[in-house]
Amino acid sequence: MCIEKYMIHILQKPQFISMLSQEVFDRDTFKFDDKMGHAFLDLQPLASASKLKQALQLTTGETKLRRLTPDRDNCLLADSFITYTNGEIVLEVGLRLSDVESGELYVTVKWIDHPIASDHRKER
């Protein structure tokens, strides 16, 4: 089993963020890589959790901000929680690959409020 980690930076205003889509391929040495499936993750609950963190004025500790549950409209494998831990909003989630017999993708997403976005909100 090969585990690869990637860091993805999304530089958009929270109200415009919707989905993170992942396509998974196998890695072949002597032929083309084969598509194994795809999964998506709705990022809007993370944006909402960021607003909740600000409303609660959280600064330290660990707090569960939101619960995400699997249903027909998402790729979640099991219940997952968006937590505030050590100053970061974190979602650790398992995703079921679509359009394939079986396959799973495990993702950790950290939401970081961009200082410019925070300053812009204060001006309003």
Image: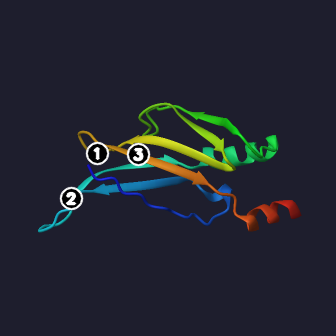
Q: In this rendering, would 17 be left or right of 39?
A: right
* Image point (52%, 31%), residue name: 69
- Secondary element under disc 3, as helix, strand or loop, is strand
Q: Position of residue 47 (x, y in %)?
A: 66, 50
Q: Earlier in the sequence, mark 2 or mark 3?
A: 2
Gap between marks 2 and 3 measured at Cα? 19 Å
Please tell me whether residue 115 is drawn above or below residue 64 in the rendered image: below
Q: Position of residue 114 (x, y in %)?
A: 70, 63
> Mark on residue 99?
1
**Residue named by callout 3:** 106
Nearer the viewer's eye, disc 3 or disc 1?
Answer: 3
Quarter of the image with the C terminus in it: bottom right
Place of residue 79 in the rendered image (x, y in percent of width and height, measured from the top left): 50, 31
Q: Earlier in the sequence, mark 3 or mark 1?
A: 1
Instruction: Give the CA distance from mark 2 to mark 1.
Output: 13 Å
Q: Secondary structure at mark 2?
A: loop
Q: Nearer the viewer, residue 100 or 90?
A: 90
Whole-angstrom CA distance, mark 3 to mark 1, is 17 Å
Residue 16: image tag: none
Q: Mark 2 sits on what residue?
A: 34
